[in-house]
Every structure is written in structure tokens, then in C-alpha cells.
Amino acid sequence: MDVTNFLMLIYVFVLAIFVGFELITKVPPTLHTPLMSGSNAISGITIVGALLSAGAEEFTISTILGLIAVIFAMINVVGGYLVTDRMLKMFKKKVR
Amino acid sequence: MNIAIEITYLVSSIFFIYGIKKLSSPKTARRGNLYSAIGMLLAIVVTLLDQNVLTFEWIIIGGIIGSLIGAVLALKIKMTGMPQMVGLLNGFGGGASLLVALSEYYKLSTVMPVNTGIAIVLSLLIGSVTFTGSLIAFGKLQGLVTGKVVHYFGQHLINVLLFLFVIVASIVVVINPEMSTLVLIITGVSLLLGVLLVLPIGGADMPVAISLLNSYSGLAAATTGFILENNVLIIAGALVGASGIILTLIMCRGMNRSLMNVVLGGWANAGASDGASVSGEGPKGDVKSVDAEELAMILEVASNVIIVPGYGMAVAQAQHAVRDLMLALEDKEIDVRFAIHPVAGRMPGHMNVLLAEANVPYDKLFALEDINNDFANTDVAIVIGANDVVNPAARHDKNSPIYGMPILNVDYAKTVVINKRSLNPGYAGIGNELFFGDNSLMFFGDAKEAIGKLTSEIKKL
């Protein structure tokens, strides 16, 4: 990988951090727990890396590690989104 | 690099960003979470079409196992157990990033470019700390590991030395990628660091620890993105990293502690050591206590009430009882609102989720800065299982370890009722002068039982 390419990745990273700051400061305190579990689920995006590692043709230590990573990341993704949904559907304005 | 795949990753990044944007209101939040999940699904499906993914049997089995475990956890967990759930999921995210980094290392090892090498060692470090740190946090919240502040000899020195070792060893590995044993040592030391960093943290400081670990799990994913040169990982990881940092800062502000203080783990010491010396000479005086019947009569003549829930409400699982109290009071035409301190409970927003579960409308819940000026015009403030966050010493006692911490000014209300099991000090280990105030009434008992009794007394009137 050449330096320009690497710099582009850093660009993306820095700009995404700013987008994140802008978005998250607008989340009201009442939703902070769902924000946490929801963003937690997003951090499961590492599943992409896990799939690429686990999907290699030959079966090596690298694929085994990738496979465990798939399991871990899927727990994170599925658990995170489901539990967030469970919480968010409880937030109601009017009751009775 | 396939253009279609790249574009799909971009679409999935947009879904993540849009999903978080929708979290700005409880009305749209659920849809936001769905958008985010769609983004994830897109990313997963398109990755399976990647030319580097050739064998599917294992992936499918692994995916199903992971999904099942995740689904069971998510559907079984009680709302009061949410902090440990988030801690656990966080750990799996960090663990996955760590494993991907290791896997990539074994794939590349001898032909590793410098920038990839840096990304791999960073991912190993952050992923490992997130993994074991989150597991310890989970253990503490679940009661498997002591929730107390833990001290061990030379803890800061040991942590600093271990960290320096990881940095030096990482530089060596980046320069000599073939040193695979050193890579494993780096991983092992990083795993140990995660344990050592979180172990000293006491229960009530967990909101900070959990937020920070949340941020780390995002950064771990982002570093994995740098390894794979994949923008969706970098964007998603950066979003989560930013989210965790913001929550951490909010929690720090809620406790009047600096981020540096938190990162070094020093805040736990301050509270414990100072607290121990102060507790002996804590505030003294006469305590007035009331029973449910008397309290019902006091409340009957009130026109407005603010309820302040704390961790004690979660422990007693009293959120439904509190909601019944709210309804009983409202039947008597009494205005009821809730005041939520940012660090009440064991994670950001913990109280809000519990009250939402009990069907308390979210527009009755107010953050500290939105309600604190109203206590002076309030007839009765009812504190349920909160302690340090309502201790007036934070406002005026310069010697108090919690001096400067923003508190809910319940003592300004005409009458303050404090529901607690005993007069024991709270987490910070200091006595609470609120209990001895002229306008304070102690309402002793387990929150669920006591509040239930109070509600039935109110209904009798």
C-alpha cells in the first residue's frame, strides 16, 4: 500500500470521528443506554474482517482464528441490535 | 478491488450514520436502530461475495452459533442486567477485532508492510484490552468479581511498565514481522493490561469504565479497518469510538473528574482513600423517620413531586413499584416528574431504560440541568436508592471527596423523603448530611416493598 492510500484512510477516519461527535452530542440522555448498545452492535462491523479471514480456501491457523472471530462478532451484532430494539420499543410518550 | 462491493460498503456506512442520526429522538430511535442493522446486513452479505471468501461451510456454522448466542442473550437478559449485557457484548466485539488482527498477522507475517504492521499491533493492543477489560467489567456488574475498589501493590507502576513494554515490543515487531512469538507475547500482555486496568474500578464508577470500553471497541474495529484497508470498518469504528468518548466525558462531568484521572484509574483511589478517613467523622444529628401512612398524608397535600431514582431502585427491581406510585399520585392530581442524575445507576441512561420498561413516559424524565432549578418550588422530593448524587456536601464542603460534583438539589425542596434500607454511606464511603436536614424524612425499607406500601396507603386516602 502506498502512502497516499494510507493517508486517505486516515482522512476517512478523522472525518468520521467528527461526524460521530456531531451526531452523538444530539442524542438525548434518556437514550444513552440504547445508544451504547446500538453503537456496540455497530462495532461488530469487524465481522467483515472476520469473514474475510475465515473464508480463505486453505484451512490454516489464520482461518481458525477468523472463524472464532466470526462467532464473537456475530454475538456482538445480533445481540447488540436485538437488545437495543427491545429497549427502544419500551420508550413511549403516553401511557394508560 | 470490486467496485460494486466498495459502493455497497459506502451505502452501509450511510445507513450507520443515518441510523445514529435517528437516535436523536425516542420517536425515531427504533427505526434508526433498524437502519443501522440493515447497514450491517448489507456489509455482511456483500463481504460473502468477495473473491477472497471461498469456503462457506465454516462461516455459516460460525455465523449461526454466534447469532444464536447473541439472540438468546438479548432476549433473556432482564432490563436491570443491561449494564453487564453491554459489557459482555463489548467484550465480544473487542475479542473479534483482536482475533482478526492475529489472523491477518499469520496470513501476512513475513511480507508485512509497515503501515499494516502498525495497524495490526494497535488492533491487538486495543482489541485485547477491550476484550478482557469488558469481561472483568461484566464480572463486576454480575457480581462474579468483587464490585469494590481493588488495590494492589504498585498498580500504576506495573500498568505503565506493561504498557511501555507493549509499545517497545510492537515497534520491534513492526520492524521484524517474522517474530511471531513476540506477537503472542504482546497479545498476552495486552490481555493482562485489560484485566489490571478494570479490576481496580469500583461499582459506581462503572458508567465511566463501560463508556470508555465502548469507545475502545469502536477504535479496535477501526484499526482492523486500517489492516484490511476497508473504509466501512474505519467509519463505523470511528463513529462508535466517538460515541464512547462523548459518553465518557459526560460521565466524567457527572462525577467532576477529568478524563486523565479516569484513564489512569486514579479516580477510584481518590474516592476510597479520602472517603475512609472522612466516614468516621461524618455528619451527625437527629434523623426523622416516617412510615408509609404518615408519608401518604404528607404527599396528599402536595401539588408537585419529583422522584429521584438511583442504583438502589435497580437493585431492588423497584421500577414497577415506582411507576405505580406515580400513577397513584397522579390520580390525586399531583404533578410527578423524575430527575435523573447522569451517573445514576451503572451505565449512562440506566435509570431511563428501567423506567421505560415500567411504562413511565419518557417526557416525565428530566436531566439534571433541566430540572435542578425546580426543586425550590417542589413540595416533596422522593429519593429512591440514590445517595452520593444528592449529597449537599458536594456543593459546599471543600474537604469532601465528592466536592464539586454536580448534584440534584433535593434539599431545596420543601420536604425531602429518602427511601433507603439504612443510614449507611453510599459508594463514595462518606456520610450524607442530607439525612440529617431539617426538611428531611427517612423512609426506611427495601425500595420495592416500601414504595408498594406507600402506594397502597395513598390509594386508601
Image (spheres, rainbow, N blue to C red):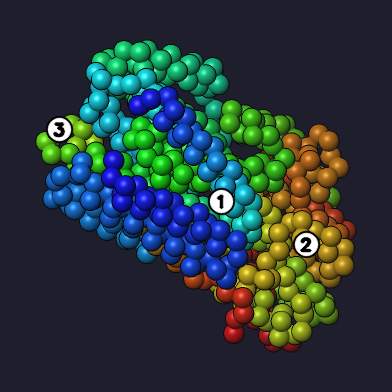
Q: Residues within 10 Å of mark 3 (few under 14, many from 20)?
A: some
Task: Give the distance between the C-alpha atoms of the residues marked 1 and 2, in whole angstroms.
Answer: 21 Å
Foreground of the two, B246 or B432? B246
At x 35%, y 53%, the residue is: B8
> In the drawing, does residue A87 fall left or right of residue B407?
left
Q: Which x, y percent locates residue B325?
A: 66, 76
Chain letter behind tag 1: B
Q: Which x, y percent locates residue B98?
A: 34, 34
Q: Which residue is mark 1?
A: B347
Q: Amino acid at mark 2?
A: Ile
Looking at the picture, do discs 3 and 1 lie on one chain? no
Foreground of the two, B281 or B27? B27
Q: Which x, y percent locates residue A44?
A: 38, 48
Query: In which quadrant is the C terminus of chain B drawn?
Result: bottom right
Tag 3, which secondary structure?
Answer: loop
Foreground of the two, B101 or B422? B101
Q: Which residue is mark 3?
A: A60
Q: Residue B445: which quarter of the image? A: bottom right
Residue B106 visible in the shown view: yes
Q: Residue B277: which quarter of the image? A: top right
Residue B135 visible in the shown view: no
Q: Residues within 10 Å of mark 1 (few under 14, many from 20)?
A: many
